Image (cartoon, grey):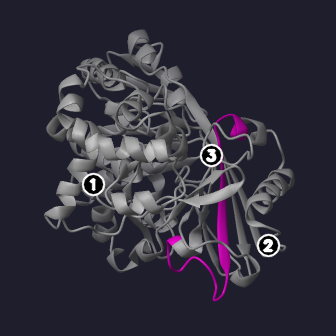
């Protein structure tokens, strides 16, 4: 019988346990223990149902073009629960000088595909629009001068579109996902598709326009589950044998010796043939340091925190917002502590009771560190004040939820892919060890599901 330990019960750990449970149900002789330090499984994936509202405590969906979350949902009988974003409502606003200004139609992140819509918008200066128009004419120059080594997102966007576009769109878009500093984030790790486009076409505008000219079928940008992403966790947990799950158990040390892998926890000392470390990055690094100091060194990276505050209002008419998915705040702005706000009832169906409104405020970076020190009531009051300053007076919400996600967003710095290649090589030398989570090969739910299932199949 093969004994396997999983350290951490977030989406990665639960997915790995689910995949191992499938193997066990097919006759393989497996003994598995899933250790989770908290009182619940799912990590940052949590859905709150209250007052007719469906509120996500962490991610609200996934990027549709990555197939692995969708495949898992369908496999578990959740195909009818899949819903796409309401892309007819898709518009994103940028907060500039206290005013919400819409990004022009046809933007693919910071790349415009409709230059007429770009010219008609009031988000950019005439000089920034001129730089946009010139970018396709610089295709050969951009292609030939592209650096052979990794570079920061700031450098990459700056080369194509200049500092104004970086500040107004590039930085807030990427900070909204990674909560990080675009002058430090790796473009090859974070925006690999854009790097490939540059290598092939030089001009990013030309590359996207070519994709659209050949009639490439586009699905909705985002996907979620009708009853919330927590359904994904619930379905997997229902498949995992309950005797495998150990909540409220903290792993304090991992050692490797002639008997295999030794796990020390509040349950005592136990031996395993294989270990999957799916804990938060800083916890995983501390556990691995005594075994391989170089591997732990390669795992050293900054991580930012996030705080999410959800407000459910009875009547949308009392909380007027512009048509769209929400707004972003450039990191350079000193007019708001918020990093972003999502108009959830306009992004996805089935989030609110009839006539309701659901807003999710997001604090990241240094603002999140400040807000983390506050109690729930104070945090909610800060979020309401910030939103009211931007959107206008807000009524008393029917439902308020506050979720703190400390050190939840690892920062993929320049050279990340090279460091991860070396880390993978060292981990392969430690037979029976796998590292899972959002610190390595992607931060989105599909990436984490892909990696966890692959590891569980290879274990």
Regarding residue 250, the answer to whether it shows in the image is: no
Tell me, yes or no, whether the highlighted magenta stretch contains residue 363.
yes
In the rendered image, the quadrant that contains the N terminus is top left
Mark 2 and mark 1: Cα distance apart in space = 47 Å
Q: Name the secondary structure under disc 2.
A: loop
- The spot of residue 101 in percent (x, y) is 59, 59
Farthest bottom residue in view: 354
How much space separates mark 3 and mark 2, taking CA atoms?
Answer: 29 Å
Label 1 CA crowd tier, 10 Å (few <14, some 14–19, many 20+) = some
The residue to which callout 1 is attached is 24
**For discs 3 and 2, the disc positioned in front in the rendered view:** 2
Say if the magenta span includes residue 362.
Answer: yes
Q: Tell me the element at label 1.
A: helix
- Is 135 located above or below residue 381 in the figure? above
- Residue 175 in percent (x, y) is at 53, 41
Q: Nearer the viewer, residue 356 or 229?
A: 356
Mark nearest the camera among 3 and 1 is 3
Q: Residues within 10 Å of mark 3 (few under 14, many from 20)?
A: some
Give the residue number, with chain letter if any, for mark 3: 38
Residue at position x 78%, y 76% in the image = 398
Task: Name the residue rendered at 79%, 62% in the picture.
Answer: 388
Boundaries of the magenta span: 347-368
């Amino acid at each position: 019988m093969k004994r396997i330990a999983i350290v951490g019960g977030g989406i990665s750990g639960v997915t790995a346990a689910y995949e191992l449970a499938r193997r066990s149900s097919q006759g393989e002789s497996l003994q598995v223990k899933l250790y989770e330090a908290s009182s619940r499984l799912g990590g940052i994936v949590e859905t709150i149902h209250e007052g007719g509202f469906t509120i996500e405590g962490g991610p609200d969906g996934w990027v549709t073009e990555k197939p692995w979350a969708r495949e898992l949902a369908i496999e578990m009988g959740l195909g009818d629960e899949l819903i796409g974003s309401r892309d007819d409502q898709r518009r994103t606003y940028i907060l500039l000088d206290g005013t919400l200004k819409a990004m022009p139609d046809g933007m693919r992140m910071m790349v415009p595909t409709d230059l007429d819509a770009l010219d008609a918008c009031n988000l950019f200066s005439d000089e920034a629009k001129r730089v946009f128009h010139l970018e396709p004419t610089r295709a050969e120059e951009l292609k030939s001068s592209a650096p052979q080594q990794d570079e920061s997102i700031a450098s990459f966007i700056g080369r194509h579109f200049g500092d104004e576009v970086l500040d107004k769109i590039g930085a807030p878009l990427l900070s909204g996902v990674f909560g990080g500093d675009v002058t430090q984030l790796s473009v090859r790790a974070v925006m690999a598709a854009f790097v490939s486009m540059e290598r092939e076409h030089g001009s990013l505008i030309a590359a996207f326009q070519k994709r659209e000219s050949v009639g490439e079928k586009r699905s909705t940008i985002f996907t979620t589950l009708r009853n919330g992403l927590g359904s994904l966790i619930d379905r997997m947990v229902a498949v995992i044998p309950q005797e495998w799950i150990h909540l409220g158990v903290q792993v304090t040390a991992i050692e490797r010796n002639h008997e295999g892998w030794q796990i020390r926890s509040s349950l005592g000392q136990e031996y395993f043939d294989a270990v999957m470390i799916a804990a938060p990055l800083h916890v995983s690094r501390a556990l691995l340091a005594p075994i391989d100091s170089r591997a732990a060194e390669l795992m050293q990276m900054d991580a930012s925190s996030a705080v999410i505050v959800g407000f459910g209002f009875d009547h949308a008419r009392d909380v007027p917002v512009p048509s769209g998915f929400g707004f972003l705040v450039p990191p350079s702005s000193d007019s708001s502590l918020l990093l972003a706000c999502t108009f959830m009832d306009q992004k996805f169906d089935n989030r609110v009771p009839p006539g309701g409104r659901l807003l999710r405020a997001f604090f990241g970076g240094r603002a999140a560190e400040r807000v983390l020190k506050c109690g729930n009531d104070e945090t909610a009051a800060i979020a309401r004040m910030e939103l009211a300053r931007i959107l206008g007076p807000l009524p008393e919400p029917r439902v308020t939820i506050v979720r703190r996600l400390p050190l939840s967003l690892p920062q993929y710095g320049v050279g990340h892919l090279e460091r991860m290649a070396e880390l993978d090589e060292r981990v392969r030398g430690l037979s029976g060890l796998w590292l899972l989570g959002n610190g390595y090969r992607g931060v989105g739910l599909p990436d984490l599901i892909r990696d966890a299932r692959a590891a569980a199949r290879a274990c």
